[in-house]
Image: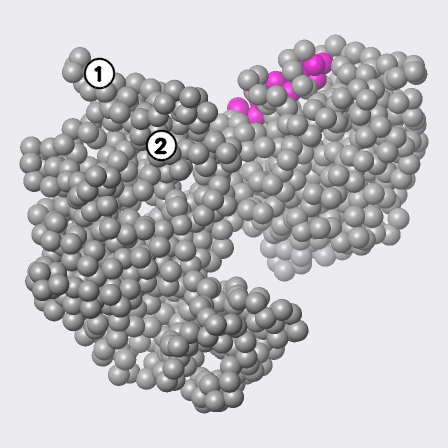
């Protein structure tokens, strides 16, 4: 062990009760004395080393060196539950880490009592202060990991704790709690952790902050003699801790004599296999892998110490665990986010009566059955057309000009890459992040990965470097396939995964970017294997994971949406059934997901000349050229792309217009599309039927409406955008809003009821990736296995048509009642001179005031208050009381579609400027 702990680390002091502190009920605090002989527990006893404090006597370390009785401080809600008349269904054993104390779990104690008071399952909380920490006894003995696990066992014996028990640990308290769980399999029914680790990889050093803290010249000074380690931990909370809360965490550590345990904990970190606590850590790690109980892993990605690799390791040991990564949160997870609510929700779902419930999972209702052949793999059409020399893909903006790839070549290339990926080490279940722009390379790699059972990870480049970094780090790919920009970003920003380049690179560049293979090398290796008689692996099963597709990030951090092979096949079949797209269809796809589905549909796909990260760059001429190149009869564009196509129509030649007259079906989705815009687009494609499907990354086709339906809906005096009737195999219901704007009502299909839109279909996503809480919320109150709360609000009419009225988080709660934004926005946009409008609310919930922010036809150069004339016209048109009218040059929109107005951002901006802040652009 390292030296460096000062003599004061061996100071002794009795346990005490804490003073009054915010959020801490004094009734929970108690002192418990545990008899000596704590080393009488099963499990190996590591050697007991000594740490010689610098200039002082040897300090005994490790299990077996302490046989004295010890007094603990802990929080215990048993008395509070008894006062409520609630009988506990089990105990939640909470263990803090370093340098916190049981105060970390005060919100868990309170939340469990609130649940019990409301009639839910009553969980007793026992949250300990580990010895030498918090207000527990200062023993003067440096306690190794094995002894800390034994200490906890002795305490629970003294408490006569019986099952069922769920452990909850943070930081190194997570290790101690898991060690206790491994040693008490007869009591444990579940385990939960927050930012912890049970294994230090041999090929990686411990994180830099810990390496620094363990330096001989730093350890004692930084952890004991000064509060530097404690203060640094408190400073990295997100958001910053309230002063009173921070002082509460400091309370038991006033003075060096009270901080010996902090230094001891740091010194006990097993930096390598020779460390005395390494055998115990290995024992716990092995034991965790054998746990067969429900598990919950909660994670703050901004933790500088417990890095994502430790979460990866826990998931390998507990593959059945529920996981939630709280984007933006860090090390002090219970302070950063609602850990208490997440834990109690999880207990209610997984262990409602202290035991795992029995019963079948919810099943699909009859009308959400797969509309096609569920056994047909995603690449079936590619196999069927592998002898066809006709074009499968056409790239209009390929280097060197238009590039056409035949079905024969694409099928062969997919096979070669699939086999080659196996040669270089890609296996079924490996995650492969595709940082490649839409085109032949992306299509070939995607289908090759799917064919061998690898999981493709796809995120829009339009998310920007920050958004892409969040997505890639969250998905934790094993491999990255990318062109130079993607690989450069991966190297610079430390994205995980071995790297495959889609282009040839000089040796120096390969080394600098960490590239292990090029796509051409992979394909050659695969061709050689196939030529030698090698075969592709067995096809993955329909319930195997196929893809993680990231959302646009328009309503918060982009979320990874997990699809199985069967669900992607269902998406393909739903599109084919709804629109008749199949073998022989020519498809112009200005939206990447549809371009990638082209080969699955057997349709030849053409990617028009445009910047895929900015749909507004697509021109009418580019669409015409794409239609001509693939003899396309179907065109799919985003609303923002349509607007620019219509705006650039004057540049079309007669030949272009002739090509556009071949189009039979025109689709636009991703955001509400005005009937005037659809009509203008169909003037360019006069023989096409215009449709605007409603869907999302979690379900690409939920409802559909054509232009005639849009026009018929416009004649109705209804609020919102009509998106038509449910597609084949889709059920749509509404969760009514309450007075707070929350969708708490029982699902209904009654006409005229406004609430959250809930869909169910076989082609809805499987789950969100490492977002257990989000996934749970998306299914709450939904009894269909493929049900999904969309986060959109709207209503059904008497004809069964769905009307979208905005997003749930954009609902305004005024003194007059709940207001959805789309209706007022539509009325405001009819005001002469107004191009687009965004309606938002400012102020406290229930008393919010409506603010209208407009973008004018003649753009205003600077944001500001609207002129009296414009403001008066907007107020007259809105149909609701409007507190203020603001004008901006351009309304903020989402990245993927450049169409969805970011009302949350507008609300923050309006609140700021109307409160006297700088009048800057939103």
**Quadrant of the rendered image containing residue 655:** bottom left
Question: How many C-alpha atoms fall within 10 Å of the one at disc 1: few (<14), some, or many (≥20)?
Answer: some
Q: Residue at x 61, y 29 (%)?
A: 197
Q: Tell me residue 502's x, y (percent).
A: 31, 31
Q: Quadrant of the N terminus?
A: top right
Q: Nearer the viewer, residue 605 or 378?
A: 605
Q: How many marks?
A: 2
Q: Which residue is mark 1?
A: 529
Please tell me which of labels 2 and 1 falls first in the chain.
2
364 horizontally vs 127: left or right: left
**Quadrant of the rendered image containing residue 309:** top right
Task: Tell me the element at label 2.
Answer: strand
444 horizontally vs 258: left or right: left
**Is residue 241 inside the magenta stretch?**
no
Q: Residue at x 92, y 25 (%)?
A: 8
Instruction: Report the mark closest to the observer, 2 or 1.
Output: 2
Q: What is the C-alpha distance between the residues marked 2 and 1?
A: 21 Å
Q: Which residue is mark 2?
A: 481
Q: Residue at x 30, y 18 (%)?
A: 423
Q: Residue at x 36, y 58 (%)?
A: 897
Q: Tell me residue 362's x, y (percent).
A: 37, 49
Q: Which mark is residue 672?
A: none
Q: Is residue 285 visible?
A: yes
Is label 2 in contact with label 1 (beta carbons under 8 Å)? no
Q: Which residues are magenta?
A: 275-293
**Is residue 286 inside the magenta stretch?**
yes
Task: Tell me the element at label 1.
Answer: helix
């Amino acid at each position: 062990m390292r030296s460096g702990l000062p003599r004061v680390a061996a100071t002794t002091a009795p346990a005490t009760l804490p003073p009054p502190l915010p959020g801490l009920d004094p009734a929970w605090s108690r002192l418990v004395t545990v008899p000596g002989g704590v080393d009488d527990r099963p499990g190996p006893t590591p050697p007991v080393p000594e740490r010689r404090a610098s200039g002082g006597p040897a300090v005994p370390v490790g299990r077996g060196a302490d046989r004295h009785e010890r007094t603990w401080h802990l929080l215990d809600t048993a008395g509070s539950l008894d006062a409520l008349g609630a009988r506990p269904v089990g105990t939640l054993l909470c263990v803090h880490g370093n340098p916190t104390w049981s105060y970390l779990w005060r919100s868990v104690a309170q939340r469990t009592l609130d649940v019990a008071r409301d009639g839910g399952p009553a969980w007793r909380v026992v949250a300990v202060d580990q010895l030498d920490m918090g207000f527990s006894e200062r023993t003067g003995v440096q306690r190794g990991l094995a002894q800390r696990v034994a200490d906890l066992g002795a305490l629970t014996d003294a408490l006569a704790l019986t099952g069922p028990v769920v452990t909850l640990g943070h930081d190194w308290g997570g290790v101690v709690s898991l060690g206790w769980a491994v040693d008490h399999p007869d009591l444990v029914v579940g385990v939960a952790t927050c930012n912890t680790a049970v294994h230090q990889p041999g090929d990686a050093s411990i994180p830099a902050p810990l390496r620094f803290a363990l330096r001989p010249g730093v350890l004692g000074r930084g952890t004991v003699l000064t509060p530097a380690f404690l203060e640094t931990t408190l400073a990295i909370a997100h958001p910053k801790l309230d002063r009173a809360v921070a002082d509460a965490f400091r309370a038991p550590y006033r003075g060096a004599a009270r901080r010996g345990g902090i230094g001891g904990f740091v010194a006990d970190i097993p930096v390598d296999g020779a460390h005395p606590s390494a055998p115990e850590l290995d024992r716990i790690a092995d034991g965790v892998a054998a746990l067969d109980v429900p598990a919950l892993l909660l994670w703050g990605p901004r933790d500088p110490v417990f890095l994502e690799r430790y979460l990866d390791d826990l998931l390998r040991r507990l593959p059945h665990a529920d996981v939630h990564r709280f984007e933006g949160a860090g090390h002090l997870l219970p302070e950063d986010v609602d850990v208490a609510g997440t834990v109690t929700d999880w207990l209610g779902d997984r262990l409602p009566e202290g035991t795992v419930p029995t019963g079948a999972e919810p099943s699909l209702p009859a009308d959400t059955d797969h509309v096609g052949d569920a056994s047909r793999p995603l690449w079936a059409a590619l196999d069927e057309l592998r002898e066809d020399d006709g074009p499968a893909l056409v790239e209009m903006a390929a280097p060197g000009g238009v590039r056409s790839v035949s079905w024969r070549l694409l099928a062969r290339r997919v096979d070669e890459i699939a086999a080659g990926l196996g040669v270089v080490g890609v296996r079924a279940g490996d995650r492969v992040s595709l940082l490649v722009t839409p085109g032949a390379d992306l299509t070939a790699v995607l289908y090759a990965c799917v064919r061998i059972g690898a999981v493709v990870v796809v995120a829009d480049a339009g998310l920007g470097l920050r958004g892409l970094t969040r997505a890639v780090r969250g998905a934790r790919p094993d491999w990255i396939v990318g062109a130079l920009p993607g690989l450069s970003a991966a190297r610079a920003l430390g994205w995980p995964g071995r790297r495959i380049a889609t282009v040839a690179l000089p040796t120096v560049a390969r080394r600098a970017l960490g590239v292990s293979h090029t796509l051409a090398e992979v394909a050659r290796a695969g061709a050689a294997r196939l030529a030698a008689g090698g075969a592709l692996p067995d096809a993955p099963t329909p319930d195997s994971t196929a893809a993680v597709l990231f959302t646009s990030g328009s309503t918060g951090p982009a979320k990874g949406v997990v699809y199985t092979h069967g669900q992607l096949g269902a998406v393909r079949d739903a599109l084919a059934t709804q629109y008749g797209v199949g073998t022989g269809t020519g498809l112009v796809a200005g939206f990447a997901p549809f371009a990638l589905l082209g080969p699955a549909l057997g349709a030849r796909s053409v990617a028009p000349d445009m910047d895929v990260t900015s749909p507004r760059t697509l021109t009418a001429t580019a669409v015409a050229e794409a239609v001509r190149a693939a003899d396309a009869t179907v065109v799919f564009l985003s609303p923002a792309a349509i607007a620019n196509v219509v705006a650039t129509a004057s540049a079309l030649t007669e030949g272009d217009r002739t090509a556009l007259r071949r189009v039979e079906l025109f689709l636009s989705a991703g955001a509400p599309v005005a009937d005037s815009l659809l009509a203008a687009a169909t003037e360019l494609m006069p023989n096409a039927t215009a449709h605007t499907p409603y869907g999302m990354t979690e379900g690409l086709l939920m409802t559909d409406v054509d232009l005639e339906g849009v026009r018929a809906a416009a004649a109705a005096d209804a609020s919102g955008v009509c998106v038509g009737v449910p597609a084949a195999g889709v059920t749509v219901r509404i969760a009514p809003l309450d007075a707070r704007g929350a969708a708490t009502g029982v699902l209904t299909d009654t006409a005229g009821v406004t609430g959250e839109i809930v869909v169910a279909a076989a082609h809805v996503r499987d789950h969100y990736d490492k977002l257990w809480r989000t996934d749970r919320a998306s299914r709450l109150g939904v009894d269909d296995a493929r049900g999904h709360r969309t986060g959109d609000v709207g209503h059904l009419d008497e004809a069964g048509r769905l009307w979208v009225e905005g997003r749930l988080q954009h609902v305004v709660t005024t003194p007059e009642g709940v207001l959805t934004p789309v209706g007022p926005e539509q009325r405001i946009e009819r005001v002469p001179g107004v191009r687009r409008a965004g309606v938002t609310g400012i102020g406290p919930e229930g008393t919010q005031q409506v603010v209208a922010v407009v973008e004018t036809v003649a753009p205003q150069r600077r944001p500001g208050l609207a002129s009296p004339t414009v403001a008066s016209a907007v107020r007259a048109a809105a149909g609701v009381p409007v507190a203020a009218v603001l004008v901006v040059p351009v309304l903020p929109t989402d990245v993927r579609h450049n169409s969805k107005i970011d009302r949350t951002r507008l609300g923050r901006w309006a609140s700021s400027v109307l409160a006297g802040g700088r009048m800057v652009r939103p």
